[in-house]
Amino acid sequence: DTGVSQDPRHKITKRGQNVTFRCDPISEHNRLYWYRQTLGQGPEFLTYFQNEAQLEKSRLLSDRFSAERPKGSFSTLEIQRTEQGDSAMYLCASSSRFGLAGGPSNEQFFGPGTRLTVL
Amino acid sequence: DAKTTQPTSMDCAEGRAANLPCNHSTISGNEYVYWYRQIHSQGPQYIIHGLKNNETNEMASLIITEDRKSSTLILPHATLRDTAVYYCIVSRVTGNQFYFGTGTSLTVIP
């Protein structure tokens, strides 16, 4: 399977615990994105990497959230001291500079997501 | 990035064409129109995108008005598996975040 993969698919944790999610993008994609989605809403942008550089961060990304992409390949998203409001689906996406048709594009390909439940 | 406006929900009979509208009246000249869909509990799936010309692929057709202020996604022969939330997004091509909004919930009826 050459798509975006995320691990774990489901995570249940108690309030106050730390959790870490992993995303493996499509291998030739240099851009990687994290989004969060709560019930009934569309995905909301959290942060964006180009190679290993974190170029954009949303105001949604509080101090308890940190994302890394150390070698420009896989990425991790850590949430410290989880709160019940952190319960959501965390989605990862990747893209390259060029789209399926060969021209410049921002087609983002999404993974299946990690569903976090904070008790 | 420009924001989009979509109807909250739509129904379509199986086998008929589903036409999903989107308004993006503040779109800039360098912004593309992207369509994604999300089937329950899955990640969003790319459908199609375009700049100003109409586009077609194996999944759908995208019709963009001449002034680029609105577009329509057409699923030519809707099936039950097309039941999903459809998102219209406008974005520059240069590695930008997507603003999804709440999309249109399409229900294909047998």
Image (cartoon, grey):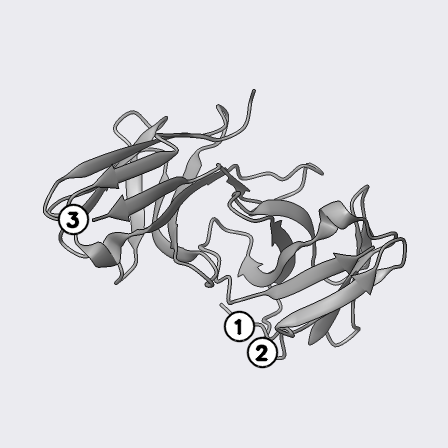
Amino acid bearing label 3: Thr
| Residue pointed to by mark 3 | A82
Disc 2 is placed on an element classified as: loop
| Residue pointed to by mark 2 | B26
Residue A23 position (above or below residue B15) = above
One can see residue A105 in this view: no
Q: N-terminal of the two: label 1 or label 2?
A: 1
Q: Determine the chain carrying the residue at label 3.
A: A
Amino acid bearing label 1: Lys
Instruction: Give the residue at x 73% y 45%.
Output: B81
| Residue pointed to by mark 1 | B3
Foreground mark, 3 or 2? 3
Amino acid bearing label 2: Thr
Instruction: Give the residue at x 24% y 59%.
Output: A85
| In the rendered image, residues at marks 1 and 2 fall on the same chain | yes
| Left or right of residue A90: residue B28 | right
Foreground mark, 1 or 3? 3
| x and y percentages locating residue A110 in the rendered image | 51, 40
Instruction: Give the residue at x 48% y 60%.
Output: A42
| x and y percentages locating residue B61 in the rendered image | 81, 54
Q: Determine the chain carrying the residue at label 1.
A: B
Query: CA–CA distance between discs 1 and 2?
Result: 7 Å
| Left or right of residue B60: residue A103 | left
Q: Determine the chain carrying the residue at label 2.
A: B
Residue B13 position (above or below residue A76) = below
Could you tell me if the residues under marks 1 and 2 are in contact, i.e. CB atoms within 8 Å?
A: yes
Residue B64 position (above or below residue A32) = below
